[in-house]
Amino acid sequence: MFNQLMQKGRQLAGIGSLVTALGLAAPALAQDKEPIVFGGSIPLSGVFAFAGIHGHAGLTDYTDWINSQGGIDGRPVQYVMEDTAYEVDRSVAAFKKITGSYSPPVYYGDSTGFMKSIASELNSMNSMLMSGASFATALTDNEQYPYQFIPGPSYSQMFGIILEYIASEGEGGDMPTVAFVYSDTEFGKDPIENSKARAAELGIDVVEEIVTKPGSVDVSAEVLKLRRVRPDYVVFHGYVLSPINEFMVQMRQMGLDTKFMGTFWSSDKLIIDKMGKDADGYMGIMPYNYYDAEESGPMLDALRAQAEKSDPEAGYRPTAYIQAWFNAMVWTEVIQRTLDAGKELTGDNMAEALASIKDWDTGGIMGIPVTVKDMSFPVGRIWRVNAAEGRYEPVSDWIHLD
Amino acid sequence: MDWLFFGEISLAGLAMGGLYALIALGFVIIYKATRVINFAIGEIMMFAAYLFLAFAGGMEMSPWVAVPLAVLGGALLGGVIEKTMIRPMLGESPIAVVMVTIGIASILVGLVELIWTADPQLLPSFLPRQPVFIGELYLAPKIAYGFLIGMAVLVIYLLYFRFSRGGVALRATASDQAAAYSMGINVRRVFNLAWVFGSLAASVAGILVAATGGLSPQFGIIGLSVLVVVIVGGLDSILGALVAGVFIGWLETVAGAYLGGEYRMPATFAVLAVILVFKPYGLFGTHEIERV
């Protein structure tokens, strides 16, 4: 116990302030050249730390891996980050500090709030492409956010995929009903209006909308509201774990046969680990293969090998790890395409390179080739919890929104 | 108007309010005896809930053993905090003492992240899962049993303060420190006792609330909601804590059900604003007259 504490203490002590992660195995040739810097405002503490810590591990491991492959265009990659505690002002301060010392062409933003706040500065700089933890629908607006992209489908697109799945479950024209349950945050509210419109287009009746505080809250009153409308499906958004568990357990205690679904941040294995058999049947949309999925591919295998190499004790890697790895994959692809075209690493050139991505094989990270649309990767698949096996299993084909 | 729905919502709100009252009691005991506004009360709740997680989850102890151990751990934490960090601040400005409690809260969050990581957690299930019906009214079992346990603890507290020597000493110290001291009451020990009892009440509430809504290092934020309760009830009034706790719990739930979840906090803060305008010392708080 003491040794574990000391080990964790050492780990956390090392990530308190500015951390520079350099690839150790980069070939000598690459190390002689000026490094390409991956910058990041990373929430290692605060409300999003559960994801930030794994995202940091994903970016660190990808950097080590790409350096072991010779870097990008023969140049080593250097990952520079700072803890933000998931606070926008600290994220902005971290951005200014890092961009004041380095010239990162790509940057990981930790929240929608930060990415919106920094947009005007990013636009005037025209020297950087940014992505990160956010899948906010607003970021698909190329006019307002020309240098920011989403490393998967936007939250609205995720709802679109979920609603398409629900519509496909309608039997004989009897379309299922749905309730949306979301947190009272910018993150939670992001896709709701678009999703109500999409549901109407598909003929799905949204019978209830529930807004709650995120995290640890009593939801028994909200469950009573849902008991009266008896939705066929409840879609959660803007949560990680609680109060999803309470909705599911209480509604089942009432004898309702409602099915439960969630978007990306509500679909990690954490739900299975913490809820146990109560999680059985829960469904989530995931644009990437899970770490323990049966699928494989050269990049997914490389990710697993690098994760095992960097921390053999860690075992399963959460979706935040894979999401961060995919961010860095896209950055690499975009930088490589820009340099191959003989262009400078400006925001405009990299955005153009990003938009040129068509039928891109992600090596098993995503299950089908992907084409960028409106600065996003609109791909996803519905997965369902098999509690006995302790994992998510696919229940739909990969869906690529046009 | 669906009266059945209103009844069910009200029942859920009153039950949650009972837990608010228990947390508020912990807050008020400490303030009443020591005049310290303890901003770390939410984090003490959180720490006790994590202790329960460690005992019942990690060490697989029976909940009957794990709950008392976790509650005692939380109470002990309160005592240690008072002795090592609050007592040296005696005589310092109230703002400085408040800042110390805010610092303690931050330290506890860091400690929890260090030991249990930043991942959200669920407590092992230890309350019955069968739905509870009162007549035709449904009540979620965790809320119902949590309320019953909370009320039992409240009654024990009230009896203790009314009839025991420690309770009388605590009330005497709260009423007039100098007079209590001159009558031979060990005031320093009473201060420590107040922190232990306040933290114990908060620890029971912490485990019950976390059993209902889950646990994370940010769990302590609930302490801020309870600040509304104690200001509405009166910072130094145990009766105020009970009445305001139940009322705020009911109001928050009814507002959430009929107006939407985003109106829970505005509804309670609206009540707070009105109370502060008309009764600045809260519904049952003591009027303090300062002459300069």
Image (cartoon, coloured by chain):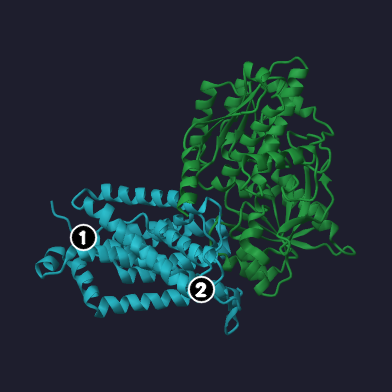
Say if B216 sits above or below A85 in the image: below
Q: Which mark is residue B62?
A: 2
Residue found at x 12% / y 66%: B181
Please, what secondary structure does the residue beneath circle 2 have?
loop
Q: In the current view of this chain or complex, which residue is farthest to the right? A: A172
- Chain B is which colour? cyan
Give the side of residue B31 with respect to residue A94, left or right: left
Which chain contains the residue that carries disc 1?
B
Residue found at x 78% / y 34%: A372
- Chain A is which colour? green
* Residue B27 screen position, x and y as percent: 34, 62
Disc 1 packing (10 Å; few <14; some 14–19; many ≥20): few
* Residue B229 screen position, x and y as percent: 39, 63
Disc 2 packing (10 Å; few <14; some 14–19; many ≥20): few
Say if B261 sits above or below B241 in the image: above
Instruction: Say which of marks 1 and 2 sits in front.
Output: 2
- Given the image, on which type of amino acid does mark 2 rest? Ser
The residues bearing labels 1 and 2 have C-alpha atoms spaced at a distance of 48 Å
Front residue of A287/B19: it is A287
Q: Which residue is mark 1?
A: B288
Which tag, 1 or 2, sits closer to the chain's start?
A: 2
| C-beta proximity under 8 Å, tags 1 and 2 | no
Please, what secondary structure does the residue beneath circle 1 have?
loop
Q: Mark 1 vs mark 2: same chain?
A: yes
Q: Is residue A304 visible?
A: yes
Identify the image quadrant of the C terminus of chain A.
top right
Residue found at x 77% / y 56%: A393
